[in-house]
Image (cartoon, rainbow, N blue to C red):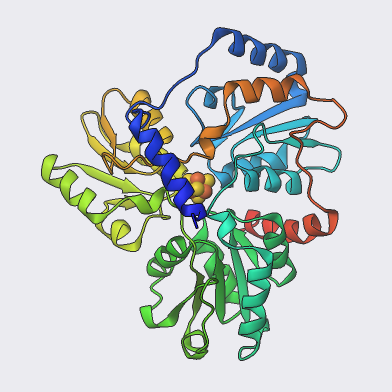
Amino acid sequence: MATLTDDIRTSAAQFREFGACERPPRDEDPALIARIRAQVDRWGERLVILAHHYQRKEVVPFGNFIGDSYYLSKMAAQQEKAEHIVFCGVHFMAESARILCRPEQHVYLPNLRAGCPMADMADDVQVDDAWEWLGGFLDTETVIPVSYMNSAANLKAFTGANGGLICTSSNADKAFAWAFERGEKVFFFPDEHLGTNTANKMGIARDRRAIYDPLHAPDDPGPYERAQVILWKGFCHVHTNFTVAHIESARRDYPGIKIVVHPECTEDVVNAADACGSTAFIDKYVKAQPAGSIIAIGTEINLTSRLADEHPDKTIFELSGQNCPLCVNMFRTTLEDLASCLEHLGDRGHDKQIFVRPDVARDAKLALNRMLELK
Ligand code: SF4
């Protein structure tokens, strides 16, 4: 039976076949652009569009705010005048914006099929099962859940209700430090690799980490009793594409090259790179390199491709060469989706509007606000 991961890899392979990876297709249909501009003018300050760095190149310029999920969640929480917040990103991002903004504001995701396979690798039943199992031999009062932003609202609510907080790839180390001030162990989900790279950054010994695989629930409590961090076995199929062989090959071909990767990459890739950080970090890192630099980037292809366009004085390319690090979900949102979403703002029963159950939103907001208050 084909798994979710098989489906994703098949989609990526199809993209590779028609050459989309070298030059992600760009739809610059003037009629669509005019339809979007007309709606932007019509709504003025009553509309805010948030655009994630991985969105299609033609969608990004319509963002009032462009950034990573940390920055965009902060912006969502700060919009005083907006009646309508349109999130060009994936589902968990729009849900987070819904949770953080005021009840009378409306939040939309222009393409409802834009999910995050990594976020789907942990669901509420699995996390409840894991928590119950851990509770069989640990005092869960001393275990602080830390949930990656890439998780469903009900998992953020679980985290908030159990004294934990949300993190993004910008602040995972600060979130872990916050948790260790309040408990003895961190239970982190759903990205094993961000968790591992954060544990490395914080100097947490290897034998004080345990991986929890929801598909093969463990039966030996020993490693979990000893662990300081318990890491969910989830991953991002885009970032786990990059390998140390790609880095070695880039260094061989381009002596002096700088390599920057995202912390959802595997530990060996992060260790072999020159720098590692969130998409906001990668953006700043590229800007800070002098003209003439050669830079390979280990993250989603649309950001890499946009950075290459923005810095013609530098040679910038994606690290894997042929592996197509495309997030097909981020790629789902088209100009047509955005235009159609905007043209129906204010309609009763708008079919792209995002809702979160009030009790779920209340607990999830606790966890999100703890992140936003991190110093
Ligand atoms: S790049 Fe990876 S983590 Fe980010 S939305 Fe896509 S699948 Fe999810």
Image location of residue 179, percent across then percent down: 59, 71
On screen, residue 17 above or below 243: above
Task: Say which quarter of the image contains residue 190.
Answer: bottom right
- x, y (%) of residue 149? 59, 54
Instruction: Give the quadrant of residue 338.
Output: top right
* Left or right side of 21 for 314: left
Q: Position of residue 98 (x, y in %)?
A: 74, 44
Q: For the image shown, how many numbered marks are present on the structure?
A: 0
Which residue sits at x=73%, y=25%?
47
Horizontal side, residue 321 vs residue 145: left or right: left
Q: Nearer the viewer, residue 22 or 139?
A: 22
Query: Can see residue 170?
Result: no
What residue is at 45 percent from the left and 51 percent from the top? 6
Image spot of residue 287 (x, y percent): 36, 34
Residue at coordinates 65% horizontally, 16% vertically from top-left?
Answer: 36
Examine the rendered structure and indicate whether residue 29 appears above or below residue 70: above
Closest to the observer: 305 or 2? 2
Residue 360 horizontal side relative to residue 216, left or right: right
For the residue pair 180 and 22, the one nearer the viewer reads as 22
